[in-house]
Amino acid sequence: MIISMRKNAARAEIDSVIQRIEDFGYKIHTIEGEERVVIGAIGVGDTSACLEALEAMNCVEKAVRISAPYKFVSREFKPGRTTITVGGNVHVGNSEFVVMAGPCSVESEKQILESAELAAKGGAKILRGGAFKPRTSPYDFQGMEEEGLKLLAKAREHTGLAIVTEVMSDNDVSLVASYADVMQVGARNMQNFALLKALGKCGKPVLLKRGLSSTIKELLMSAEYIVAHGNNDVMLCERGIRTFETATRNTCDIVACAVLRELTHLPVILDPSHATGKRSLVPALSRAGVAIGADGLIVEIHPNPQKAISDGAQSLEPAQWLDMMKSLQPYIELWKAERMSTVAV
Amino acid sequence: MIISMRKNAARAEIDSVIQRIEDFGYKIHTIEGEERVVIGAIGVGDTSACLEALEAMNCVEKAVRISAPYKFVSREFKPGRTTITVGGNVHVGNSEFVVMAGPCSVESEKQILESAELAAKGGAKILRGGAFKPRTSPYDFQGMEEEGLKLLAKAREHTGLAIVTEVMSDNDVSLVASYADVMQVGARNMQNFALLKALGKCGKPVLLKRGLSSTIKELLMSAEYIVAHGNNDVMLCERGIRTFETATRNTCDIVACAVLRELTHLPVILDPSHATGKRSLVPALSRAGVAIGADGLIVEIHPNPQKAISDGAQSLEPAQWLDMMKSLQPYIELWKAERMSTVAV
Amino acid sequence: MIISMRKNAARAEIDSVIQRIEDFGYKIHTIEGEERVVIGAIGVGDTSACLEALEAMNCVEKAVRISAPYKFVSREFKPGRTTITVGGNVHVGNSEFVVMAGPCSVESEKQILESAELAAKGGAKILRGGAFKPRTSPYDFQGMEEEGLKLLAKAREHTGLAIVTEVMSDNDVSLVASYADVMQVGARNMQNFALLKALGKCGKPVLLKRGLSSTIKELLMSAEYIVAHGNNDVMLCERGIRTFETATRNTCDIVACAVLRELTHLPVILDPSHATGKRSLVPALSRAGVAIGADGLIVEIHPNPQKAISDGAQSLEPAQWLDMMKSLQPYIELWKAERMSTVAV
Amino acid sequence: MIISMRKNAARAEIDSVIQRIEDFGYKIHTIEGEERVVIGAIGVGDTSACLEALEAMNCVEKAVRISAPYKFVSREFKPGRTTITVGGNVHVGNSEFVVMAGPCSVESEKQILESAELAAKGGAKILRGGAFKPRTSPYDFQGMEEEGLKLLAKAREHTGLAIVTEVMSDNDVSLVASYADVMQVGARNMQNFALLKALGKCGKPVLLKRGLSSTIKELLMSAEYIVAHGNNDVMLCERGIRTFETATRNTCDIVACAVLRELTHLPVILDPSHATGKRSLVPALSRAGVAIGADGLIVEIHPNPQKAISDGAQSLEPAQWLDMMKSLQPYIELWKAERMSTVAV
């Protein structure tokens, strides 16, 4: 930590700050500047608590952390790349570009089976579909719940695809985990800490979506919650953030994919559907996602989007989905070549 | 709803849109513009679902809602003002300006009892204090949990203050409700719909904080969740939103207080502590909160902020708190005069 | 400055950084942490340039400034408060709460004279009105230009009010300065550096509006431009920033008024009209502006807003304006009492 | 336009709104809903002015535009694609992927000549370099001005590259136009309307950067200014917007490139350097820019970034630049194939 004192801080104040820092177990280096005193604190301790304590002191101008607040998810902790095995035979991470696809919500047996076949036909390895739906309005369709989970399991049997589906409450973790291959945390729940803790012990990989207004650092802290509570298999998902721009549903912070590759060993998935909210923009953004080096995509598709109960505007139509997957192939080839050359180095 | 078609929409497409709208139970008015066709839909139906369905159709340019998506919380539903009785004798709403105060976290018996006495001495009617703490880092203090709730109850006995405290999971609702007078929903949980539904049946008033990046409309929709599930006693809380500005912890959208008075009959509380993150700014913002017509404040205070476990930087020191409450008095008098004159009209 | 090196920085890299810092004239303090080396740089030099140079070095993790990047506008440079005399007898700053009012645009002789009389009747001291209008669309009314300036001068003669009006280009500075008492810089021009430089030599006070997405620090840097080029008389104006919220035209960062009072000696004016975009919200926000300690207001009014060429929705109607000014009086009294007690201390 | 009246609007109020709309030359369609009256206005007129007038009326709830506010820049006006010829032999637009590269600032003859050779060696067709620099601080290097323009011209002679350089004031337009092949408008000047008007008559193509907090629609309106004043050759540039995220200098709204291709016939250039602020992220984002279908890139490079006067942290080092351009080749091949297949259709 680096602590800069206010300009007019008295000697007694400086001493009280030093004492406080030492109480937390750090060693001190003091720099007497022309305008103010700056203190460096070295060692290992509860940095968050210490920073908060220091910022509460009137004589302190600013206290900043030098080292990252997360540990297990950092590349410093694990310099390589994490590969997560899903449903036995899908490997999300460095070696394979994995596409997940499916409808926003499970609506009926017919709809989810058709969706699953469509997903598989396009080359997806994992089927998405919501059984518990977070909806802004209490009057909107809230999902088929356990009935939906059962239909997803049926779709898995028919197609061999693994299943990713959302869990919205720590109460539902064991229920959802008994059906799903990957537990999805929605953007609105990224900092639902009770849920994150429960997922630490759920025994299934987690797909953690970035919150609408969460920083990259906060996303990593939420992943750290899951890992610190016992589950190493976390995939991060960029799905657009909220900004002033209204031309798209969200603003895709695509560079976050590249930033995350620098900061963490966990795989990063891009969601071009929520990031744009509009199906015509999904193929172009998907190409960009492969090109920037995401580890996979999660895409909304529907056998008949114009009849979808939710998110129809951003769901690809069958032909569009198959076309897109075909057009992605050469980009995925370039992606593989890039990964192999990086590994070689 | 107003639906504008794409410029080149064919007659068959327009007909398919009309059919779809009529399927949802609306009546149709078609306007044939020079550039495109615009359709008005009149009646009562599942507007959200219909809008989603229409936006999924490629021939539709835009579909917009005319009426508000919330009902029970709107002033159109209830033109007067809701007053919420807390702990038997505190009335939050139109007639009384209510101040809630206390530390960020319950830390110990001594700390919470001293805080409660300090709060009461300044004129607060409700004691705040967190027993379950949402913390960005898994390594930070997570609260005293039930032990903390017991200490809050003890502070209530000693001072007669009512208690407001946060609940973070639907799992904990009945436990927290057995101690608290007001159930607080934190900003990160504003769209934790499982929690909101549980609070609809908890039998205690709710203080619902606005999410970091939630719109005023979304705040009202979350309140609608609680009311629609059976609980009319919801207070809304503006506590700052996340923007590009980093000079303060959040950006206080103070005008939201005035906007909410136009849109809803529910009381609005301002949190100047989280909105600024810095104790020196709290008194000025509190004055502004009274002046703009909020119904109350929730303020962080601490017997010794420099030793606080959390949020020390934004907690008022004892003398500062007592001074502030004294200086607020003339503003509260003006507030009362304004409210009485408005009622008279 | 504090410079933290990357974790694995080699000794030679650290030495090259030290050399670079010393080249800029600073003295060095090195802290050897457990994880990385941190360097403190002490002295007076071209900090911005040095920071940029260091951040360009791959072995540097982060380089942060400790002291503020502005000088003349800071309270450290001038601990008191600046009072700016406008048009001979209006004093904007610490001792007087000054209201500026008038229409968005000068539209005709009749309209501006009626507006001026209305402004004066309500108690405004300065008349606002645009002769050069920044409009998002090239097809919108762009202002009456010099003809409008002449009408403003006529209104001044009739009412004795001083005049504030916008200047949009360094080309127009001398023309506008020959008519105006205060030169207004619009939000979109806050970082039009050619304009700011020209205003440094214009001989008239400047009202500098905060940019839609400008930080408080950037606002102060733009004021520093004007002062550094020779003009000390700068008033700052908070007029709302751009965020994700669309319920109001902009989001009023009212706390900026309080933050600015801590950081600078320059007066701060609040613009409740642009901050809200809606006339019904203007009186409540104006009260809050007085209460938080702004030094004045700039308010849009119009003899007949429903016929206004621009900004009609946010312009107060005559009766509303007079009512508001009456209702502000007790708040202004409290403001004066506060200022006098502060001065006494 | 669609105008929705307030719920309780009286018949006389509705009539006054209808009258007002008809005064602007539109025809009326009235829809009597269950809750309120909605009015459709059809025809051609001054929509912006009419909307403003209507929003100023208290009985109007909302007035929304159906057609786009820009004309000449829209694909509806020109369904094909604009190709802009720069310096005689470079064609920016649909058929060629054009890379512009160079340092942030022109610093010296040696530096700009080395930069130009480096740019050409990597395959750039246009040299960038600032002679007039917009700097947040008045104490930072402000550019070499005309001297810098002369050095750019020299670099053009040596390498055959065309020149793009920034102009900051309408005052400097003719000076800059006498040297430059492309006139760059910086993000801070996107709504400097005096400058935009002057560029309408400058006789050179313009590269218009998106403002830090400007919407895509506002970017198109600023382009419309230039076109409406006589200059059809405008390239748009996405360079990152300002959001809450601080991990990167700005947040790249890469999807804007795809949205703009849907809305306008003008070419779109991506600036990966300002969008990220960090050289390690530039190659990945450049690949994504090609993949999403931008028409070109503008990249900061420097013979020795660690000694650059400005923007060193985001400038590519020589080897990195050459590597990147090599690695972009297969993506550019895919881009060409895509464009040819689109044209064929």
Image (spheres, coloured by chain):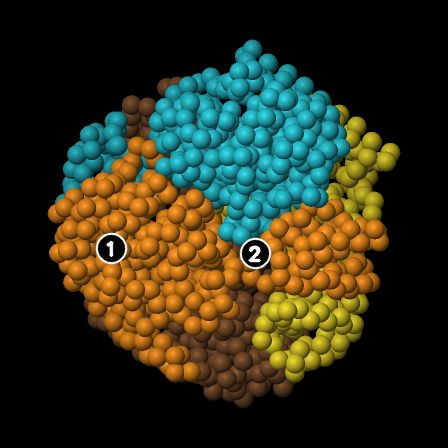
Chain colours: A orange, B cyan, C yellow, D brown
Q: Mark 1 is on which residue type?
A: Ile
Q: In the drawing, does residue C70 fall left or right of residue B63?
A: right
Q: Secondary structure at mark 1?
A: strand
Residue type at tag 2: Asn
Reading the image, the residue beneath label 2 is D192
Label 2 SS? loop
Chain containing mark 1: A
Q: Does residue C92 appear left or right of residue A256 in this picture? A: right
Q: Is C166 placed above or below C298 here?
A: below
Residue at numbered disc 1: A163
Q: Residues at marks 1 and 2, common chain? A: no
Residue at the spot 78% in from the left edge and 46% down from the top edge: C265
Q: Nearer the viewer, residue A336 or A53?
A: A53
Chain label for disc 2: D
Q: Residues within 10 Å of mark 1 (few under 14, many from 20)?
A: many
Q: Rounded to the nearest whole Å, what is the CA distance between mark 1 and mark 2?
A: 52 Å
Tally of numbered tags: 2
Residue B317 falls left or right of residue A90: right
A210 to A326, vertically: above or below: above
Q: Is residue D288 or residue C15 the one in the foreground?
A: C15
Few, some or many residues within 10 Å of mark 2 (<14, 14–19, 20+): many
Q: Nearer the viewer, mark 1 or mark 2?
A: 1
Question: Residue drawn at (53%, 52%), measured in percent from left and top?
Answer: B139
